[in-house]
Image (cartoon, rainbow, N blue to C red):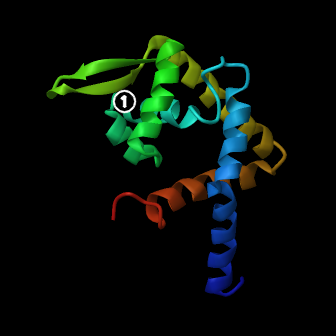
Amino acid sequence: MPPAGDLGDAVAEALGTLLRRSTRAALHRRLTEGLGEAVDDVTYPVLSGLARTGPRSAADLAAEIGLDRSGVSRRATRLEEAGLLRRTADPDDRRATLLALTEDGERTVAVMRHRLAASIEDTLATWPPGEARAFARALRRFTEEGPFATAP
């Protein structure tokens, strides 16, 4: 087994590839292909973020997905015009607006999630079954306990 620093460096390098903006954009392009003019690698984070969090203000969603509020608002306008997102009054603050997926938006996200799961399964199908299951368990544990964990 390599020294601890070497192992950490190897994992950090792999994570760097996954977290790189160009890597994410290429994946988002594949997942959104053919889903309509408003659905692309630019609007994907808004759709995906709302699917994870439920209705949110543009500011709250911006913090969740790593964009600024105005960027979220511009993307939300494209998605709203395509019928995938709606703006509703915030029940806790009548001056504020929440962004929420429409039924068409939810169906679009379901297609993207299915495509992602299928792509992952296709890749893992070439691995020995025990190795693929071990990877899935280890990745889950790493996200729950590792440096990206949200709870201490």
Residue at x-position 66% and y-position 55%? 18
Q: Along the horizontal axis of the image, is 43 left or right of 14? A: left
Q: Is 95 drawn above or below residue 3 in the view shown?
A: above
Tell me residue 11's x, y (percent).
65, 69
Asked where in the image residue 102 lies, by quadrant, the reply is: top left
Tell me residue 123's x, y (percent).
79, 43
> How many numbered marks have been drawn onto this rendered protein structure?
1
Tell me residue 33's x, y (percent).
73, 25
Q: Which residue is mark 1?
A: 54
Asked where in the image residue 54 lies, by quadrant, the reply is: top left
**Element type where label 1 sits in the image:** loop
Q: Along the horizontal axis of the image, is 92 left or right of 23? A: left
Residue 74 or residue 15, whichever sits in front? 74
Check disc 1 and give the amino acid type. Gly
Q: Residue furthest right?
A: 126
Q: Is 137 drawn above or below residue 71 in the view shown?
A: below
Tell me residue 140's x, y (percent).
54, 53
Residue at x-position 53% and y-position 61%? 142
Q: Residue furthest bottom?
A: 3
Image quadrant occupied by the N terminus: bottom right
Residue at x-position 42% and y-position 38%? 70
Q: Residues within 10 Å of mark 1 (few under 14, many from 20)?
A: few
Image quadrant occupied by the C terminus: bottom left
Q: Along the horizontal axis of the image, is 105 left or right of 14? A: left
Residue at x-position 84% and y-position 46%? 126
